[in-house]
């Protein structure tokens, strides 16, 4: 019975974690003995712990066989040298008067150095320097969880390539409680470009210069401000401390900035953005179209250019230098100006544009000078006729509508649009006309001789021919192949004024027998030398025009 009770008690003790070393035999008084810690297994979770900057106190486990003892109930723990790298001692002591444990035991574990490269927030105090020929030594900061490592105690720092422009390296090596290393890079850039200056300002070009930057740089980058997106874009790269900017729009403001750069190992190191320079270009040279009298006033005309306004200078002096009078036109959209002049005197005039910017007035070049009269014969052509009253009347009528017609640069002459429809109500008469291969009577007969005369004058002036038609039969007043037939609504004769001057058409009839057409300009100007030739192949005639030896117009006629 006693043995059974002891067996049950042992089982109870084991279940409850109570240790003993002996019990009484059957028939004796039981006396429990506590377990000596030296016989127990005392452990910590790991044999090594990484330095944290704080005291390391891992949990201690005390076991005897399957019995696990309780901290501060059965035993206490004390740690020694448990913060820095090295051996740490752990002393485990049985609680005084414990019924289950007695004695003490010492164990140890290691604290090993922490890898400095794995710390977070590793930064340099500065990663961007400006070259000045001196070594750059930024400090490093990084954080451990419980401790901020100190230079000299916990790490050392060394530098490489930290004088010249390029990428430099700071290397940090662990010391004491830290091991390993890591590197951080920083850049040294050229100094900022200063003192931008503008010279040789014209309508599309100017020179931009600046002070040189030290550091054995590769060159400079010129940036232009983009108004649409508010950013600078690279315009050009140069090795010099100046650049001749070209291809810009006249009377337009541009903003430029220059950055120095050095290329090292395939990488460009750019200086910081420095001062910028706003440049407004001069207006372009004005093209004067011409002018004409309107009553007592002369109306000068020119092509509009971008500007704030214009100046018109006129004089009786051919060089427009003596006795010059200036008219200021404070309207950049103006394309003409009326002013009083005597019709009986010959004047010369010219125009220039100006733009106002930054409190200054910038003038463009003067235009080529023009005269107040169209007295320069650019080309002319004459045809002859001997016709009845009706045909003669029609010729005179057509010339009346054409005479004095002014074609500004770019304008196209249309015979039908200028003369209009030939009707009896408009003064045209019945006269012979070609109808297929027969001759018939029709309103306006004879006007084709006027269109033919103008056509040949345009050919000789080397003007582009836009439309021309042949007659159905040969005509007597011009070489075959050089005629120009007209018919309202179907056949027209057109040519274009592709010159830079206005052309005035003079179309007159003399002695009821001669049509004289002159193309006049108000500038002393000549066209390229023109050669007209007509060749024949059977019933087909080929008209060819050459200007300066090159063919620029060909047309065919078959009669």
Image (spheres, rainbow, N blue to C red):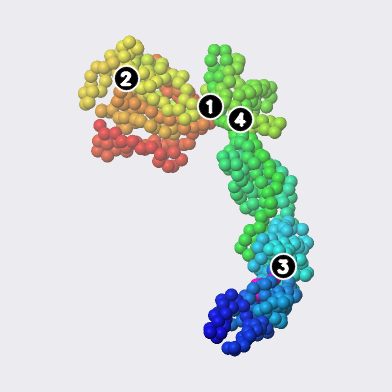
- Measured Cα–Cα span from mark 2 to mark 1: 33 Å
Q: Which residue shows up at 38% across the image and 32% down it?
A: 466
Mark 2 lies on residue: 446
Cβ–Cβ below 8 Å for labels 4 and 1? no
- Is residue 245 positioned above or below 527 on the image? below
Q: Looking at the image, is mark 2 or mark 3 earlier in the sequence?
A: 3
Mark 1 lies on residue: 289
**Number of callouts:** 4
**Mark nearer the viewer, 4 or 1:** 4
Q: Which residue shows up at 72% across the image and 69% down it?
A: 55
- Is residue 295 positioned above or below 534 on the image? above
Q: Observer-nearest residue: 40 or 545?
A: 40
- Is residue 173 positioned above or below 7 on the image? above
Which numbered dot is residue 489?
none
Write down the quadrant of residue 555 in the picture. Answer: top left
Q: Position of residue 443 (x, y in %)?
A: 28, 16
Q: Looking at the image, is mark 4 or mark 1 earlier in the sequence?
A: 1
- Is residue 355 positioned above or below 424 on the image? below
**Mark nearer the viewer, 2 or 1:** 1
Mark 3 lies on residue: 54
The magenta span reads 54-60
Mark 4 lies on residue: 307
């Amino acid at each position: 019975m006693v043995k059974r009770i002891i067996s049950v008690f042992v089982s109870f003790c084991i279940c409850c974690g109570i240790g003993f070393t002996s019990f009484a035999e059957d028939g004796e008084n039981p006396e429990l003995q506590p377990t000596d810690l030296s016989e127990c297994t005392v452990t910590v979770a790991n044999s090594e712990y990484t330095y944290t900057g704080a005291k390391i106190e891992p949990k201690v486990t005390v076991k005897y066989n399957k019995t696990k003892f309780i901290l501060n109930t059965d035993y206490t723990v004390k740690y020694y040298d448990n913060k820095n790298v090295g051996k740490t001692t752990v002393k485990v002591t049985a609680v005084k008067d414990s019924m289950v444990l007695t004695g003490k035991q010492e164990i140890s574990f290691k604290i090993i150095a922490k890898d400095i490269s794995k710390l977070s927030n590793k930064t340099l105090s500065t990663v961007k320097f400006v070259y000045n020929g001196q070594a750059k030594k930024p400090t490093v900061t990084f954080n451990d969880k419980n401790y901020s490592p100190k230079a000299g105690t916990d790490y050392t720092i060394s530098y490489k390539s930290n004088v010249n422009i390029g990428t430099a390296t700071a290397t940090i090596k662990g010391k004491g409680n830290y091991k390993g290393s890591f590197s951080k890079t920083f850049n040294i850039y050229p100094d900022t470009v200063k003192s931008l200056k503008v010279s040789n300002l014209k309508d599309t070009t100017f020179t931009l210069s600046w002070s040189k930057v030290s550091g054995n740089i590769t060159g400079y980058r010129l940036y232009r401000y983009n108004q649409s997106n508010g950013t600078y874009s690279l315009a050009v790269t140069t090795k010099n401390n100046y650049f001749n900017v070209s291809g810009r729009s006249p009377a337009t403001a541009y903003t430029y900035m220059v950055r120095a750069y050095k290329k090292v190992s395939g990488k460009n190191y750019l200086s910081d953005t420095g001062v910028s320079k706003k440049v407004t270009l001069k207006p372009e040279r004005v093209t004067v179209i011409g002018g004409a009298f309107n009553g007592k006033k002369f109306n000068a005309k020119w092509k509009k250019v971008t500007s704030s306004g214009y100046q018109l200078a006129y004089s009786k002096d051919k060089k427009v230098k003596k006795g010059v009078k200036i008219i200021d036109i404070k309207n950049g959209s103006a394309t003409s100006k009326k002013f009083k002049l005597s019709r009986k005197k010959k004047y010369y005039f010219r125009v220039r544009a100006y733009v106002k910017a930054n409190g200054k007035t910038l003038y463009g070049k003067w235009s080529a000078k023009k005269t107040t009269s169209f007295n320069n014969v650019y080309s002319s052509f004459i045809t002859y006729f001997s016709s009845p009253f009706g045909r003669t009347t029609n010729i005179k009528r057509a010339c009346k509508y054409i005479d004095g017609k002014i074609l500004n640069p770019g304008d196209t002459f249309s015979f039908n649009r200028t003369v209009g429809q030939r009707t009896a109500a408009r003064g045209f008469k019945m006269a012979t006309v070609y109808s297929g291969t027969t001759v018939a009577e029709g309103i306006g007969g004879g006007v084709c001789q006027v269109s033919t005369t103008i056509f040949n004058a345009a050919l000789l002036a080397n003007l582009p021919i836009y439309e021309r038609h042949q007659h159905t039969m040969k005509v007597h007043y011009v070489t075959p192949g050089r005629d120009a037939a007209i018919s309202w609504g179907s056949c027209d004769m057109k040519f274009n004024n592709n010159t830079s001057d206005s052309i005035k058409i003079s179309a007159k009839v003399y002695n009821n027998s001669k049509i004289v057409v002159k193309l006049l300009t108000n500038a002393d100007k000549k066209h390229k030398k023109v050669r007209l030739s007509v060749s024949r192949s059977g019933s087909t005639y080929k008209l060819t025009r050459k200007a300066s030896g090159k063919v620029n117009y060909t047309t065919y006629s078959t009669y």
